[in-house]
């Protein structure tokens, strides 16, 4: 009994010690504030939105004082950017966007995000600007004609007959109004905001500070917190005076799921997945029952399409890739003497080139990757078609065709009801149409009835 009580008391002490350690690690002291930090690098994509959303949620749950978003981006998708702006403006904790490290850039969509943040800061030797929205080109445009007819590259003030120009004007005007409203909300320079869109203007950190685009130029995180201390920011619930004198910074690390999403939003990876998926489906159609190519192909195709829906995708190019796939499948059943395979390879190549030529430089598939991959996939598909055609034309090596007309030997006496023979190295039950055959007689197979072969005596000519 004493041993049980001692074990119980030791267990209580052990669990109390564990709880003390956890409380010491996770709960900040009264004089110490926790500020979370999120590193946001690369193009603004749905994975960037996911990272920011989770960072804000974690910071709020942990009762963090603020969130630093260390950003280095060339820009990205406007759809993801718009949602990130809404997240920042409605955040219950201050968002400090910090263009860092030294040498980093804040371009395109990043400019909007910086303007939406409660505190805007930059490291030395960084730059910001070039926020002109670029329309994803799905099926050709009149850009060359527009540039020739408008030497100053200006956007017409009034609507005209050219829908492409009208759409571009709508996009520009919407972007200007959006960024000017953000500048007004946080009392930042609206002139640079507008010129970064209409003239793709880009300035250094020192110029941004002088023109009140940002509030702070900080050497590092500690310098940033020192300069943030005492500033008043506009929150969704009103103004708030920041006190970061005793704050510590906790860097948030991305989890496996977020790393996978970021990996999938790479346009080159998305294109490769789509092509591998196409090849897997083709292999399953040509060799039904293989299972693995079909399952793997379906998974890759779904992941590829998921990635492509958040990136630039030429639907005409994707349609040509599907046409190429259909050509390879039809080659099996239609005698075209290789013409369908050639058409499939050409369609695959042109479709890949169209996909690689759509969108801007951030969300564009590499031209070299598109050419090499489409040629490789086309060659593999043509080879699969060739081998499957050979198999279909090869003589049958199973079934009744291997038995009917073949010569065998009677292993027992055979009558119209029973008997056994050996034919093609196999032992079969057999019977005659009429009469009896002696053991050792040469026989000829006439037909098969279930598991019994109907035979006759083999003639000398047979």
Image (cartoon, rainbow, N blue to C red):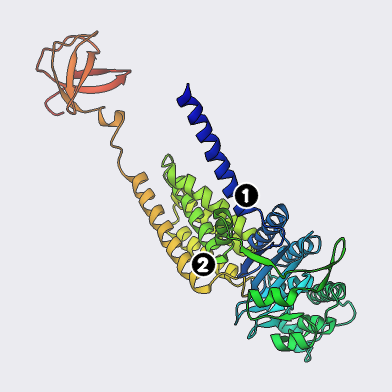
Mark 1 surroundings within 10 Å by alpha-carbon count, few (fewer than 14), some (14 through 19), many (20 or more): few
Question: In the displayed structure, does residue 461 sit left or right of residue 107?
Answer: left
Image location of residue 201, percent across then percent down: 74, 86
Instruction: Single out the mark in the foreground, 2 or 1.
Output: 1
Question: Looking at the image, is 384 positioned above or below residue 168?
Answer: above
Count of numbered circles in the view = 2
Image location of residue 172, percent across then percent down: 81, 76
Q: Which residue is mark 2?
A: 349
Question: In the displayed structure, does residue 32 sit left or right of residue 277?
Answer: right
Q: Residue at x 59, y 57 (%)?
A: 258
Numbered label attached to residue 23 = 1
- Name the one closer to the observer, 271 or 41: 41
Question: Looking at the image, is 353 positioned above or below residue 257?
Answer: below
Image location of residue 148, percent across then percent down: 74, 88
Outermost residue to the bottom:
151
Q: Quadrant of the C terminus?
A: top left
Question: In the displayed structure, does residue 114 sit left or right of residue 105?
Answer: right
| Residue 141 visible at all | no
| Residue 307 visible at all | yes
Q: Residue at x 52, y 55 (%)?
A: 325
Question: In the displayed structure, does residue 202 sit left or right of residue 390?
Answer: right
Image location of residue 335, percent across then percent down: 44, 52
Q: Secondary structure at mark 1?
A: helix
The numbered mark, 2 or 1, whose residue comes first in the sequence reads 1
Q: Secondary structure at mark 2?
A: helix
């Amino acid at each position: 009994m004493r041993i049980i009580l001692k074990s119980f008391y030791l267990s209580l002490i052990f669990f109390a010690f564990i709880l003390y350690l956890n409380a010491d690690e996770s709960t900040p002291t009264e004089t110490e504030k926790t500020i979370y930090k999120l590193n946001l690098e690369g193009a603004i994509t749905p994975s960037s939105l996911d990272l920011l959303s989770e960072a804000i949620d974690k910071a709020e749950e942990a009762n963090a004082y603020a969130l630093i978003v260390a950003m280095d981006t060339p820009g990205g998708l406007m759809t993801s950017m718009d949602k990130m702006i809404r997240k920042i403006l409605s955040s219950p904790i201050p968002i400090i966007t910090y263009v860092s490290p030294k040498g980093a850039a804040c371009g395109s969509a990043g400019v909007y995000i910086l303007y939406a943040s409660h505190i805007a800061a930059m490291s030395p030797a960084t730059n910001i600007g070039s926020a002109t929205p670029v329309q994803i080109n799905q099926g050709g445009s009149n850009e060359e004609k527009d540039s020739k007819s408008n030497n100053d590259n200006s956007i017409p003030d009034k609507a005209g007959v050219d829908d492409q120009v009208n759409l571009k004007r709508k996009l520009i005007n919407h972007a200007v109004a959006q960024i000017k409203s953000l500048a007004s909300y946080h009392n930042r320079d609206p002139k640079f905001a507008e010129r970064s869109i209409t003239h793709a203007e880009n300035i250094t950190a020192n110029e941004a500070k002088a023109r009140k685009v940002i509030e702070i130029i900080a050497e590092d995180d500690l310098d940033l917190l020192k300069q943030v201390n005492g500033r008043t920011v506009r929150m969704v619930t009103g103004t708030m005076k920041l006190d970061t004198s005793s704050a510590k910074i906790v860097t948030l690390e991305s989890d496996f799921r977020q790393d996978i999403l970021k990996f999938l939003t790479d346009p080159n990876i998305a294109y490769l997945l789509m092509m591998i998926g196409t090849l897997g489906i083709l292999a399953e159609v040509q060799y039904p029952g293989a299972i693995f190519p079909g399952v793997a192909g379906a998974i890759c195709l779904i992941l590829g399409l998921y990635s492509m829906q958040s990136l630039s995708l030429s639907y005409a190019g994707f349609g040509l890739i599907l046409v190429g796939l259909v050509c390879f499948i039809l080659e099996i059943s239609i005698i075209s003497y290789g013409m369908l395979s050639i058409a499939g390879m050409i369609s695959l190549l042109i479709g890949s080139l169209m996909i690689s030529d759509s969108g801007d430089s951030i969300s564009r598939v590499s031209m070299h990757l598109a050419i090499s991959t489409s040629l490789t996939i086309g060659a593999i598909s043509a080879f699969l078609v060739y081998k499957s055609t050979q198999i279909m034309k090869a003589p049958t090596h199973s079934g009744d065709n291997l038995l009917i007309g073949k010569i065998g030997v009677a292993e027992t006496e055979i009558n119209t009801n029973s008997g056994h023979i050996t034919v093609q190295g196999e032992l079969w039950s057999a019977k005659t149409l009429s009469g009896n055959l002696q053991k050792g007689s040469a026989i000829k197979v006439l037909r098969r009835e279930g598991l019994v072969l109907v035979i006759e005596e083999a003639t000398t000519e047979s």
